[in-house]
Amino acid sequence: MKTDICIIGGGPGGYVAAIRAAQRGFSVSLVEEGALGGTCLNWGCIPTKALYSATKLLTQVEEAAMIGLSFAKPDIDLAKLAAWKSTVVATLVGGIETLLKKNGVTLIRARGQLAEPGKVSLSTGETVEAQTIVLATGSEPVEIPPFPFSDPAIWSSDDALEIQEIPERLAIIGGGVIGLELATIYRRLGSKVLVIELLPEILSTLDLDRRTVSTLKRSLKEQGIETLTHVAAQSFDTSENGVRLNLAAGEPRDVDRIVVAVGRRPRSRDLGLENCGIEVDTRGFVVVDDALRTTAPDVYAIGDLIAGPMLAHKASEDGIFVVESLAGHEHRLNYTTIPQAIFTNPEIASVGLSEAAAKDEGIDVLVGRFPFAALGKALGMREPDGFFQVVADAATHRVVGVQIIGADASDLISEAAVVVQNDLALEAIADAVHPHPTLPEGLKEAAENALGRAIHTVNR
Ligand code: NAI
């Protein structure tokens, strides 16, 4: 079979690249051996968000008595909850298949491997000849030897999202994004949750301000999620009382299940990279240049397979960038303007630079903040925790970064993403009328606060 572009991997990097390539008039083959949508749709973003919203309801029901609304203690039908989550996933996966078909993408259900430049061999025995090959095989959870996923006591994030049981006591190794999102879900389901982080701080692989992290830590504590930092998990023993987790410092902890969420690694093995002389770095990431070209001619790599933030929307952006470049269109790729949303309670979202990172870059900063507690809408929602923070260049007022911790931060960050992406100034937010009463008013007030003219908070 001959095609203009052959893409290996049908996750948010690969399928988005395939659709855009078809829109630009290329003939496209997309090779996927498993479920379309990759990790994000099947074992990541989407199932976690389904469970996040379902379990948020549990907390709301439990707390409603405070405002005069009493309900019976909720019953949790885990099988039904898991089935509903799977329906959400299946609907989206089906939607991608339809989109691929309608756009004229040839979907090849097989495992693909680079045979030589311009050739992909398939597990069916066939070969696809392509002018351009795009590698988009994503990433997989890192396993640490003392805690093998093959042991029933040890769960990967994929296992945890199956929600087959609610462990009474759950330990999570890794205080990163996945660990804390799962901690939030399982705590709401009723587990006693302990998070163990090797580094001195949780979420320290991200560019978050200290104030943001300490707000989250306070809230985790209030929810009953215990975090131990600067501690290595060493081994475990199983007994009839459950699982004994041995730590490098302090007493062992008795739990029922252990989730390991210590990062993800690129799926660059068994891809046939060596057949084309494609280099990988020491961590297994495929080496690419600014145009996302690998070290082999006409082979590109995108998404989690290359260094950079491991985010679905970043993978899609990579895919669009490669295809638009092939089509001769100019498309900017700038990882610093890629927003991130973390689904903890409260949510955290950020775009651009933190205050500390902006200072490190030598920017004389102007910072504005506004608390959720001063927003009528947030009080009405009973979600007064958190704040908006806007960081701008003092000389030009250009907004270089925004962090939001609080209710619906994941939705609120998009206005800030438009501002940061387009190099707009504080006034672009501050002078725009925001409807009242809404949460985005907090971003406007934070920008006004940076300019010394916020109405509903005291200006410094
Ligand atoms: P991560 O890099 O965010 O966090 C892993 C944490 O585990 C780190 O804090 C690390 O110091 C710690 N760690 C490593 N070895 C350890 C050990 N032996 N004992 C204790 N702690 C240890 O990785 P995570 O959470 O697995 O997520 C993988 C990737 O997926 C990340 O890049 C993340 O940003 C991305 N992701 C993003 C989401 C979002 O944006 N909402 C959701 C889920 C994943």
Image (cartoon, rainbow, N blue to C red):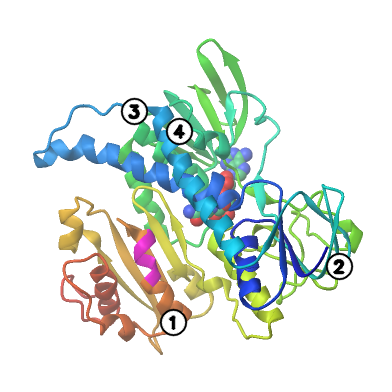
Residue 274 occupies quadrant: bottom right
Between 126 and 410, the residue placed more toward the observer is 126
Give the spatial CA distance, label 4 vs label 2.
49 Å
Q: Nearer the viewer, mark 3 or mark 1?
A: 3
Q: Secondary structure at mark 1?
A: loop
Q: Which mark is residue 118?
A: 2
Q: Position of residue 47 (x, y in %)?
A: 47, 44
Tell whether label 2 touches label 4 (CB within 8 Å).
no
| Residues under numbered marks 1 and 2 in contact, where contact means CB atoms less than 8 Å apart | no
Q: Which three-letter amino acid code belongs to the residue tagged 3?
A: Ile
Instruction: Please tell me which of labels 1 and 4 falls first in the chain.
Output: 4
Between the C-alphas of marks 1 and 2, the distance is 49 Å
The image quadrant of residue 13 is: bottom right
Q: Earlier in the sequence, mark 3 or mark 2?
A: 3
Q: Specify which label sits upstream in the sequence, 1 or 2.
A: 2
Rendered image quadrant of residue 151: top right
Check disc 4 and report the residue beneath it.
194
Question: Which comes sooner in the sequence, label 3 or label 4?
Answer: 3
> What mark, if any, has residue 364 been given in the picture?
1
> Residue 98 location in percent, x, y?
55, 58
Residue bearing the label numbered 3 = 76
Answer yes or no: do the residues labelled 3 and 2 have beta carbons within 8 Å?
A: no
Tell me, yes or no, whether the two marked residues, 3 and 4, touch with CB atoms within 8 Å.
Answer: no
Tell me the kind of residue under disc 1: Asp
Q: Which residues, given as a range, are shown in magenta? A: 410-414
* SS under mark 2: loop
Q: Is residue 230 magenta?
A: no
Callout 1: CB less than 8 Å from ligand 1 = no
Which tag, 3 or 1, sits closer to the chain's start?
A: 3
Q: Nearer the viewer, residue 360 or 160?
A: 160
282 lies above or below 391: above
Q: Position of residue 342 (x, y in %)?
A: 44, 54
